[in-house]
Amino acid sequence: MIRKIFRSAIVLSVMLTSASPVCLGEDWLSFLGNGGNGFAPKASLPVKFTVSAEGKSAENVAWRSPLPGRAVSGPVTVGNRIFSTSSSGIEQRWCEVTCVDSQSGIQLWTRKVKATGRPFCHPTSANAAPTPCSDGERVYAFFSSNDLVCYDLEGNLMWYRGLAYDNPKVGNDVGMSSSPVLAGGVVVVQSECQADSFAAGIDAKTGATLWQIERPRKANWSSPATLRGADGQMVVLLQSSQGLSAIDPRSGSEVWKLDEKCSSVTTTVAVNGRFYIPGSNLKAFDLPRGLEAPKLLWEAPRVSPGNSSVVVTDKAVLAVKGSVLAATDLDGKLLWQTRLGEIGSVWASPVVAGDKLYIFGMKGRCVTVDVSGSEGKIVGESELGEEVLGSPAIIGNSLVVRSVDALWKIAADK
Amino acid sequence: MPASTTRFGWLHQTSHFTALAMLACLSLAATGQGRARAQEGIDAILKIQRGGGGVAAAHAAAEKLIASGSGLESLLGKAGSANPVAKNWLLSIAQAVADRQPAGTTQAALERILANQAADGEVRYWALDRLAAGNTELREKLLDGRTEDSSLDIRFEAIQLVMKKLPSVESAKADEALKQKALVGYQQLLKAARQHVQVNAVADVLKELGVEVNRRQQFGFISNWQVVGPFDNRKEVGFDTVYKPEDEYARSNKVTEKGTYPGKGENSQVGWQPVSTDKPDGSIDLNPVFLNEKGAVVYAFTTIDSPADLDCQVRFGSPNANKIWVNGKPANVNNVYHTGSQIDQYVAPTQLKRGANTVLLKLCQNEQTEAWAQDFSFMVRFTDETGLAIPVTQAVGNPAQ
């Protein structure tokens, strides 16, 4: 059905389905998804979608929901609800969170707070740069201005923190994009700039500060990652150009540290008993045991990601640098490299649904690559027509994309 | 592409609340006991402190305030005097409360909040936003005539709206009557606009219509300075090093015009030299003066005349680490390099006294070699809290006395 993009949902049916979140068991709760590796193994998405230049017709586009202001964050989903951040108004000082019904694209609620920190950023970025996270009951949204707010799924304020009000000299005028993570009931945020850098653990239920530690005074856009060690202990990985620290999320104390010069843009991915640190080379480590530092498993110089984080599937590690997508096997052996054509600058981390990788260029061009074979094969190229800098979410057999101006649901026409 | 979405407010929210519980809560809210409890909750939120103190109590209070359906006006009545964190709590609670009530029951309260020019500007903007949710026509109606609103958010949006409605440059160029209408309209907007991007947008249109706005004057940038340097900032040692001009100024609120000081190089002596700008953004480029010196500290000094004793703001921008003093008092400090520079990048409260006032800036250039890390510049202006330039004056050449 070509004109789905303008489909108006029947309000009553939406109300019935949206009255409370329906758990679909396929939530995408944070940047790079629940596994933190950008991989949804069971998802099956159309390899291509189209939006006409006039915006009057579309194929494999379920809906487009325009949002206020702009954002370079990615969406998260809980059941049939999608949560997306925006920053609007003068200097993007209004920090907004919008809840959208995933079936219809109808906006269920929007909440806003006024930035208490510096909202400035590069013109291509936005105050709404970090991707929010959720524990399935609440959504936690962080902004470049260091405003951190928690709502329940109905939009009721649980708590709010102005972390720049607490730390007045924190602020990155290029724009801070570090996404929060949840670990053991603690929201961990990492805000690093040239002035008062910090990481903090905030009680997810009450918003109280459990700990705060100083971090290197250097701009850093990477996000924390969670890792469960071989002994079962959950740690949060904080990376910077000065190393990778594993932090106890309840106390903020350092459990171990690797003296690896990490990327200050892309994020460490931890999955399946290993973690992958982006730097000048991509390095894989095994899980730490007790207080022992993790061991280097391999190093892959040709699979160093550029601006977007790597995706790790059950068979491969996939990284984009410039317009080249490279894949190694899980032992670091280079499998193939594929040129992505005229994709342009890439900031959004790719995601993999089944055996298809979806990557968006900044100008909105989406390239779909079949990553199942002995070489990466481009199987679809699509134009959204709007800028995309945030990593998409996968919900069921749909791709949820946050463009700078709107939220989109890409799904096969029925 | 038209919006494909709408809000449907309170109905779906009520699914988690029995009608009985809701009625009970609303009834309680209307009673004296309910009002007292609501006030306790509001007071708990107003006690939130820097560093997160009081957040746990506020969390508990927020839950009760939302459930009890507190009145929007009582919730937001003290927002103007709250700290910015507490104000955001109150605004967020109000949003949830408003969602739980049928639109008709909150409309009158929202209209009263919007109409109250003495109320907090951000609260009033939220009230307008809420009233006009999803209704572009109503939004435009509410914004009509508000280009000089006390809320900067409302003012900004009202000016944007008028800009859309004034004759386009193309039509004005083709029709003299339309041109006159546009000129009058844009000149009014120039007086009303406060945010620098908007001021520039209005000035751009006026330029297209043949009227050149002196933007430097419009923004109130200080044009004439005395500068001295370079002093050592290799390995960024200079930011916390008090060089002689800084020491002299801190002790006497003035600098020695004809004095020389030990500079960065061995046996070098450096002295004050005048610089000025006629750039629209008031920026002073230090690279030509100091020959692109890296690892350098430069001081800039000036004297300005204020028409009155004023509580005001010093607004400045620089891609370099900086410190600024006004009348001998530290006003702001930013140990940050090369994250861009823009008008009003840094804003700090300060005071001017009637007559002569001194300003000293310390500007630090580091040793980064990247092409984007070469700028060495600054811009300074004084404004009221809305961003309106204070008409300070300077003697030509501004000799340091």
Image (cartoon, coloured by chain):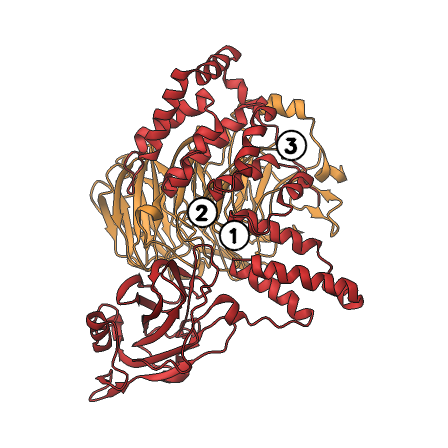
Chain colours: A orange, B red
Q: Is A363 left, or right, of B269 in this rendering?
A: right
In front here: B392 or B103? B392
State which chain disc 1 sits on.
Answer: A
Label 3 or label 1, whichever comes before in sequence order: 1
Label 3 and label 2: CA atoms lie apart by 25 Å
Q: Secondary structure at mark 3?
A: loop
Q: Secondary structure at mark 1?
A: helix
Q: Nearer the viewer, mark 3 or mark 1?
A: 1
Q: Disc 2 designates what residue?
A: A130
Task: Tell me if residue A378 comes above or below residue B207 in the rendering.
Answer: above
Label 3 or label 2, whichever comes before in sequence order: 3
Q: Is B237 left, or right, of B181 in this rendering?
A: left
Q: Are marks 1 and 2 in contact (CB under 8 Å)?
A: no
Task: Tell me if residue A42 comes above or below residue B348 in the rendering.
Answer: above
Q: Position of residue A150 (x, y in %)?
A: 41, 35
Mark linked to residue A90: 1
Q: Is B201 left, or right, of A141 in this rendering?
A: right
State which chain disc 2 sits on.
Answer: A
Q: Residue at x 33, y 80 (%)?
A: B227
Sort mark 1 into few (<14), some (14-19) or many (20+) by Cα contacts within 10 Å. some
Q: Secondary structure at mark 2?
A: loop
Tell me, yes or no, if residue A350 can be seen here.
Answer: no
Q: Are marks 3 and 1 in contact (CB under 8 Å)?
A: no
Q: Position of residue A300 (x, y in %)?
A: 40, 58
Q: Residue at x 43, y 47 (%)?
A: A115
Q: Disc 3 designates what residue?
A: A104
Amino acid type of disc 1? Ile
Could you confirm whether marks 3 and 2 are on the same chain? yes
Amino acid type of disc 2? Pro
Q: Residue at x 75, y 39 (%)?
A: A3
Q: Is B260 left, or right, of B112 in this rendering?
A: left
